[in-house]
Image (cartoon, rainbow, N blue to C red):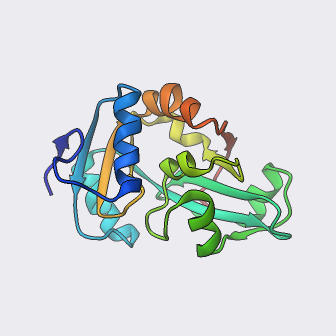
Amino acid sequence: MELVEGRPQDKRIDKEERVYDLLDQLNIDYQRIDHEEANTMEICLEIEKTLKSTICKNLFLVNSNKSQYYLLMLKENKKFKTKMISKQINSSRLSFGSDEKMLEYLDITPGSVSLFGLMNDHDFKVQLLMDKDLLQDEYLGCHPCINTSSLRIKMKDVFEKIIPSLHHEPIFVEVYNE
């Protein structure tokens, strides 16, 4: 795996190209690596070593009556505890959202979930939830809507440029290692 600057020279699938277009439009510097399909946290940890940045767990969640969907970003070493998060956001019990709704709302599939899926949520069906501890990190490592590439982006750019451009104001939650 080799860390390179900027977008790939070869043509990629549309949803990945849209991520690079957004980053270029926002004038954000980033580094990228291409790799085998990253479908486990173990593979992601190897990628994290190359990126030298925190790779988040990104979870697509729904409340019990399926009226509200969430994208939860938390540090990879933390565990999702539905009771803890549900209480903080004043929601009924959370569970994992369906693959179908993930595709419908975010145009992404399991294993490829990232902040960038929100650029496809034009009807604002998904609320962004973020682990407060992410604010301490210098870089964010995430997929560009496909899990065969990963990006390293300055966290400052995530909060000052990317999130405002997505129009999905985050709710910060505390996720404890218990």
Placement of 89 over or under 104, stated as above or below: above
Placement of 65 over or under 162, stated as above or below: below
The answer to whether residue 159 shows anywhere in this view is yes
Location of residue 25 in the rendering, given as x and y in whole percent from the top left corner: 39, 29
Location of residue 84 in the rendering, given as x and y in whole percent from the top left corner: 75, 58
Location of residue 139 in the rendering, given as x and y in whole percent from the top left corner: 38, 37
Left or right, residue 86 beside residue 144 = right
Residue shown at 65% from the left, 39% from the top: 168
Rendering quarter of residue 130:
top right
Left or right, residue 56 beside residue 38 = right
Residue shown at 62% from the left, 59% from the top: 105
Residue shown at 41% from the left, 27% from the top: 26
Report the label total.
0
Left or right, residue 134 beside residue 87 = left
Quadrant where the C terminus is found in the figure:
bottom right
Location of residue 7 in the rendering, given as x and y in whole percent from the top left corner: 24, 42
Residue shown at 64% from the left, 52% from the top: 175
